Image (tube, helix red, strand yellow):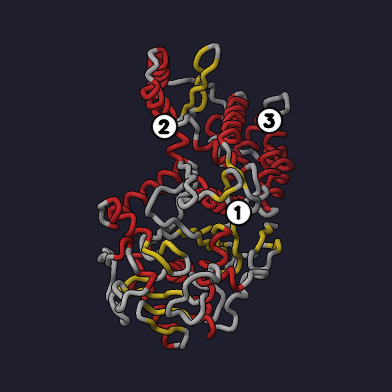
């Protein structure tokens, strides 16, 4: 049976769907004001592995991931500007144009990493009416109060506030007790609806340089012109598309103290029932021991990997090599090692016979023990390192059989490393790639390093990498 670590109880629990064999999963998606970095994307690889494992267990999955295109302030404690508004002003673009551009960039990153597209990707701006309705419901039930800059959730009115995730201090849930309280009654009270131009202007709305800048995205509401708080959208869209309660809510561990705590509070206060049965959280990706983030100035994007000749799936391989709840430290050396390991896997797979289109009953019996061990590893709280070791164990065998091909194809249903696409296919470099390689070598001979780098990026975009050796360039990758 599949067992998952539930952040609510901090224990690994048997997973039992709420409705027969159908599973409803909600993943906190990106705030589309900039490119996603590989630290962000680790959470989405983890959610994808979860989804694929559910499918491998014969379950039906409906997966929803939101797109935050309004309301996420720079400070999680309701301080600073809206991230999207600020980025749009800096780039002299409309907020909508900016959000659309970075949404498409995010979708491209998902495709590059072989992450299955969610069944629905609702945008916060598409559910404004429903978010206003939720605030009105909370207001009628006595869970809100109004200040000069908006409507806040009164955490003192909810006895269970701060108890959802065991072992979490209330100070941590508030996003830290050192924040300016302003007109909030308690530091951990949180915004449900923010006013665009509060009078008088309160500190959270003091713009850079002191000026007041007109918002591009604002809506009329019973409390005045404004916009929804960040937490509101997830409560609304998950309920609208999955019902309440639904099965699994996923996100990064950074969501626990504020975002997910507040989601639970407003949803359970409004409807008197749990929001989700299981909460799964992925650990951080760090760089030199520090969290990867924009404020830390250490962002690395998928495009940057490609520009350096790294296959995006090498990053997926790197992520699979660590358990989703374990911190993973990013280095270029470890990523290069992951690329070499992935290339070796593909080389080995090309030597196998092609897996049969239809697996006979006899073949199923032959591969059952191996696939059973693989499924046991994945069902043990998504133990990808152990499952990956089983794949390598299979490939180390000297024989090359159709049974092994069938197992590789089975494992790649979860790993999604493109291995099943190369099984039994000899490596052939297309003429257009060879031409780019020759042009790059000429550029290197002429010491035109900028052009050589551009050509390398073009080669990588086609799914191939070039390794410079003493014997000349070696081309790897491809399907």
Is residue 44 something that shows in the picture? yes
> Which comes before the other along the chain, label 1 or label 2?
1
The residue labelled by disc 1 is 283
Q: Are circles 1 and 2 on residues that touch, CB within 8 Å?
A: no
x and y percent of residue 63 in the render? 49, 58
Question: Closer to the observer: label 3 or label 1?
Answer: 1
Question: Closer to the observer: label 1 or label 2?
Answer: 1
Q: Please tell me which residue is depicted at 57% across the width and 65% down the height of the picture.
A: 256
**Crowd around label 1: few <14 · some 14–19 · many ≥20 (10 Å):** some
Label 1 to label 2: alpha-carbon separation:
29 Å
**Crowd around label 3: few <14 · some 14–19 · many ≥20 (10 Å):** some
> Which comes before the other along the chain, label 3 or label 1?
1
Q: Quadrant of residue 331?
A: top right
**Circle count:** 3
Label 3 to label 1: alpha-carbon separation:
30 Å
* Closer to the camera in the image, 215 or 260: 215
Q: Please tell me which residue is depicted at 33% across the width and 55% down the height of the picture.
A: 87
Label number found at residue 395: 3
Label 3 to label 2: alpha-carbon separation:
28 Å
Q: Are circles 3 and 1 on residues that touch, CB within 8 Å?
A: no
The residue labelled by disc 2 is 461
């Amino acid at each position: 049976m599949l067992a998952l670590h539930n952040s609510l109880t901090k224990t690994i629990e048997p997973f039992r769907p709420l409705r027969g064999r159908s599973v409803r999963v909600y993943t906190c998606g990106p705030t589309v004001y900039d490119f996603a970095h590989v630290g962000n994307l680790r959470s989405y690889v983890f959610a994808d592995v979860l989804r694929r494992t559910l499918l491998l267990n014969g379950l039906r999955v409906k997966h929803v991931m939101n797109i935050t295109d309004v309301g996420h302030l720079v400070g999680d404690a309701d301080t600073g500007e809206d991230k999207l508004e600020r980025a749009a002003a800096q780039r002299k673009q409309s907020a909508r144009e900016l959000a659309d551009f970075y949404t498409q960039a995010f979708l491209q990153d998902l495709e590059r990493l072989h992450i299955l597209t969610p069944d629905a990707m609702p945008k916060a701006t598409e559910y404004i009416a429903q978010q206003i309705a939720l605030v009105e419901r909370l207001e009628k039930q006595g869970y809100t109060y109004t200040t000069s800059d908006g409507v806040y959730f009164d955490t003192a009115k909810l006895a269970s506030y701060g108890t959802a995730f065991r072992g979490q201090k209330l100070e941590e849930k508030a996003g830290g007790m050192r924040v300016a309280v302003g007109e909030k009654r308690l530091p951990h009270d949180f915004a449900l609806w923010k006013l665009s131009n509060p009078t008088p202007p309160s500190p959270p709305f003091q713009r850079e340089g002191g000026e007041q800048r007109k918002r591009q995205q604002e809506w009329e509401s019973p409390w005045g012109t404004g916009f929804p708080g960040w937490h509101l959208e997830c409560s609304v869209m998950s309920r609208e598309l999955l019902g309440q309660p639904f099965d699994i809510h996923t996100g990064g561990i950074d969501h626990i103290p504020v975002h997910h705590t507040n989601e639970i509070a407003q949803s359970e206060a409004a409807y008197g029932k749990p929001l989700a049965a299981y909460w799964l959280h992925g650990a951080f990706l760090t760089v030199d021991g520090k969290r990867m983030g924009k404020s830390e100035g250490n962002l690395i994007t998928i495009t940057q990997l490609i520009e350096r000749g790294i296959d995006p799936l090498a990053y997926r391989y790197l992520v699979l090599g660590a358990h989703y709840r374990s911190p993973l430290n990013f280095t270029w050396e470890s990523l290069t090692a992951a690329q070499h390991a992935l290339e070796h896997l593909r080389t080995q797979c090309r030597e196998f016979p092609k897996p049969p289109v239809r697996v006979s009953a006899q073949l199923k019996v032959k591969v059952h023990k191996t696939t059973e061990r693989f499924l046991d590893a994945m069902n043990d709280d998504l133990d990808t390192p152990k499952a990956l070791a089983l794949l390598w164990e299979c490939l180390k065998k000297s024989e090359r059989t159709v049974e092994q091909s069938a197992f590789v194809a089975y494992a790649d249903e979860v790993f999604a490393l493109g291995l099943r696409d190369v099984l039994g296919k000899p490596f052939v470099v297309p003429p257009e790639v060879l031409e780019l390689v020759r042009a790059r070598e000429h550029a290197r001979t002429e010491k035109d390093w900028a052009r050589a780098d551009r050509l390398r990026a073009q080669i990588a975009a086609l799914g191939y990498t070039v390794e410079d050796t003493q014997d000349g360039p070696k081309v790897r990758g491809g399907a």
